């Protein structure tokens, strides 16, 4: 079955998540990570893409990229093929290393860009590895002064410099969640979705709440990127109820609370 065409970004910005096939480990050691970073550097130079954020995790990578010349697929292919060659030489493992096609999502607003960068940097802390600022294999340290491959100027300009970046990164613990408008639900596993719902709602069982309180909880999960099926499964609410709330949200009423807008 042919894959659906990748959704184009009018702004040229994308959140991209290449993953290991069958969730297999991509990086066995720091040598692997250094080689991957060098391949990123080479691909960036050859394609002209700008890298606004990245995080190398064990079985996937997060990117926030700016693709002015429609070279996103070429950029990812270069890295995948060259890194696959390295892995084959080291381990004898043949074939592709990363799932194709890779997951991507357009970024069309400044707020979405900032949320995506913050989310990417939060990944090591969410995984229980270390605080974002201490993680060696992401762009967070580039934003804090390290010389690296990241194009930090756009985000720093939007946030008023390095101090603004630090404040934004630490502003609230929503950095651990899918962010407003994201389709990141397609990347997260069920146990992660349950964890997110619990942190947002306190208790996933919202079916016993009053109607207004229940619907407000559903709206929050919708705003955080949950699908109707996921809300129904995680929270024990009928699909019809969720669909009705989503229809109301799409009409713009009731409004999403201000506190969620830049979460």
Image (spheres, helix red, strand yellow):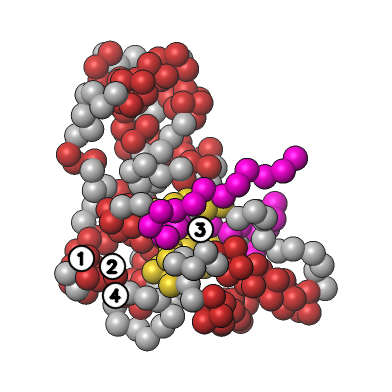
Residue 23 on the magenta span = yes
From mark 1 to mark 4, how far is it between C-alphas?
10 Å
Q: Verify CB contact (< 8 Å) between mark 1 and mark 2.
A: yes
Q: Is residue 230 above or below residue 245?
A: below
Please identify the quarter of the rendering in which residue 205 is found.
Answer: top left
Q: Residue at x 25, y 27 (%)?
A: 252
The mark found on residue 155 in the picture is 2
Mark closer to the chain start, 1 or 3 = 3
**Residue farthest bottom in this picture:** 147
From mark 2 to mark 4, how far is it between C-alphas?
6 Å
Mark closer to the chain start, 1 or 4 = 4
Q: Quadrant of the N terminus?
A: top right
Magenta span of residues: 1-26
Q: Verify CB contact (< 8 Å) between mark 2 and mark 4.
A: yes
Q: Residue at x 44, y 53 (%)?
A: 9
The residue where tag 3 is placed is: 16
Q: Is residue 162 left or right of residue 119?
A: left
The residue where tag 4 is placed is: 153
Q: Is residue 36 visible?
A: yes
Q: Residues within 10 Å of mark 2 (few under 14, many from 20)?
A: many
Q: Is residue 72 above or below residue 212?
A: below
Measured as percent of width and height from the top left, residue 16 is found at 50, 58
From mark 3 to mark 2, how far is it between C-alphas?
17 Å
SS class of the residue under badge 4? helix
SS class of the residue under badge 3? strand
The mark found on residue 181 in the picture is none
The residue where tag 1 is placed is: 159
């Amino acid at each position: 079955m042919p894959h659906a065409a990748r959704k184009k970004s009018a702004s040229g910005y994308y959140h991209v998540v290449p993953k290991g096939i069958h969730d297999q480990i991509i990086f066995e050691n720091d040598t692997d990570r250094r080689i991957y970073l060098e391949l990123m550097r080479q691909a960036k130079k050859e394609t002209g893409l700008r890298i606004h954020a990245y995080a190398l995790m064990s079985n996937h990578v997060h990117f926030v990229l700016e693709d002015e010349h429609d070279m996103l697929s070429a950029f990812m292919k270069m890295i995948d093929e060259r890194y696959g060659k390295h892995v084959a030489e080291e381990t004898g493992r043949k074939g592709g290393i990363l799932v194709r096609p890779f997951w991507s999502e357009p970024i069309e607003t400044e707020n979405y860009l900032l949320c995506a960068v913050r989310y990417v940097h939060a990944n090591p802390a969410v995984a229980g590895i270390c605080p974002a600022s201490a993680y060696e294999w992401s762009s967070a340290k580039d934003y804090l002064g390290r010389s690296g491959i990241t194009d930090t100027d756009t985000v720093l300009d939007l946030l008023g410099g390095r101090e603004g970046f630090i404040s934004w990164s630490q502003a609230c613990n929503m950095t651990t969640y899918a962010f407003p408008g994201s389709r990141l639900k397609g990347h997260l596993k069920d146990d992660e979705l349950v964890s997110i719902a619990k942190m947002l709602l306190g208790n996933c069982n919202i079916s016993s709440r009053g109607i207004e309180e229940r619907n407000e909880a559903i709206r929050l999960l919708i705003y955080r990127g949950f699908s109707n099926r996921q809300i129904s499964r995680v929270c024990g609410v009928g699909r019809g109820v969720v669909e009705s709330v989503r229809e109301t949200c799409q009409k713009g009423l009731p409004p999403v609370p201000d506190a969620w807008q830049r979460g």
